[in-house]
Image: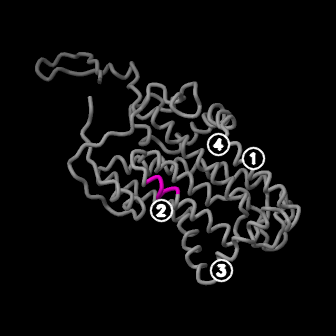
Amino acid sequence: MREDRRRIPVGLTLLCLALGTPLLADESAWTPPETPENPLKSTELGQGSYPDPSSGTDRKYWRRNLFKRVGSDQKFLITTWWPAEFRRIGFTVPLAASVIGATQGGQGSSSADHQLSSGFGHWGSGEQKGAHEFLTQIGDRRAVAALIGSSYLISRWAGNERIERTASLTGEALINTTIYVGVLKRVSKRARPNDHGGGEFFISSPMEHEETDSFPSGHAAGAFAMAAVIAGEFHERRWVSVVAYSTATLITFSRVSLERHYPSDVIAGAVLGQSIGKMVTHRSRGLDDEPVPLWRRFQPAVDPGTGDFEVRYQHSW
């Protein structure tokens, strides 16, 4: 049994997602991305199955309680996703490189982290500073929260499930990203480059006006988490992925050029954010169209013609 859905041109939907404006729909049908029989086998994980956080509800995954989804994500991340990601070269190599570069940054201005930071610094000054400040403001968590919230409410009002789903999953990915970035910042306590520090870690007694939350970059993590979700939801449109990741890259670069982060900070944030964004997208596809539990298919009813009580069985195919 399939439901009719409206379709909006992808270019207009992406613009509306960026601006939070109402949507105009045509009468064409749209179907969500195909859900494989075993979602984990189509991803990097290779085996296993997704845990069921639905608690017996037949609502679509991305319309369920956001905070309950995030809570369920933590168990999945720790027990399934992170162990698999650390076996994947595309995740471990750049993450290890960023950690090594960050730890060497405390050795002084001769480190690669400091030299790269100084080399990119001139991009954030003069006439170009305004553009980089605008990019970094786009990635600010308050602006992103307003964008996602307005996009979700407007798309739900307009009946566009694709944008509604994308906004919901993006919010889930960003909350997960904020949790892990926040923990790592508190543990690492690395000084930001604009404080004229040496990039040292574990600063227990910071000087006045010194910020010790440089590693990893929250802007980079959030931008790449959003890009991963948008690219996954519009996977059939290659240019959407290009625009999403290009925007995330520009936001990330602005953090280095404005001397708010070292290169190793943004690399670690980008790797972490992209991984979490992919996790949310893949997990939603495995749970979006899960069947109604057997016990909920039996419902009491009264025959309007005879008034007799009966029990009905509901089944969809």
The answer to whether marks 2 and 1 mark residues whose Cβ atoms lie closer than 8 Å is: no
Instruction: Name the outermost residue toward the bottom.
Output: 126
Q: Which of the two labelled residues, at mark 4 and mark 1, occupies the earlier sequence position? A: 4
Q: Which of the two labelled residues, at mark 4 and mark 3, occupies the earlier sequence position? A: 4
| Lateral position of residue 206 relative to residue 245, left or right | right
Give residue 189's quadrant in the image: bottom right
The answer to whether marks 4 and 3 mark residues whose Cβ atoms lie closer than 8 Å is: no
Q: Secondary structure at mark 2?
A: helix
Please provide the residue range marked out in magenta: 240-245
- Which residue type carries mark 4? Gly
The answer to whether marks 2 and 3 mark residues whose Cβ atoms lie closer than 8 Å is: no
Q: Residue at x 35, y 63 (%)?
A: 21
Q: Secondary structure at mark 4?
A: helix
The answer to whether marks 4 and 1 mark residues whose Cβ atoms lie closer than 8 Å is: no
Name the residue tied to disc 1.
96
Q: Residue at x 26, y 18 (%)?
A: 312
Alpha carbons under labels 2 and 4: distance apart: 32 Å
Tag in front: 2 or 1 = 1
Give residue 85's quadrant in the image: top right
- Which residue type carries mark 2? Ala
- Which residue type carries mark 1? Ala
Q: Is residue 304 magenta?
A: no
Say the numbered circle drawn on residue 146: 2
Name the residue tied to disc 4.
90
Alpha carbons under labels 4 and 3: distance apart: 33 Å
Q: Which of the two labelled residues, at mark 2 and mark 4, occupies the earlier sequence position? A: 4
Tag in front: 2 or 4 = 4
Instruction: Name the outermost residue toward the left.
Output: 305
Q: Residues within 10 Å of mark 3 (few under 14, many from 20)?
A: some
Name the residue tied to disc 3.
125
Alpha carbons under labels 1 and 3: distance apart: 31 Å
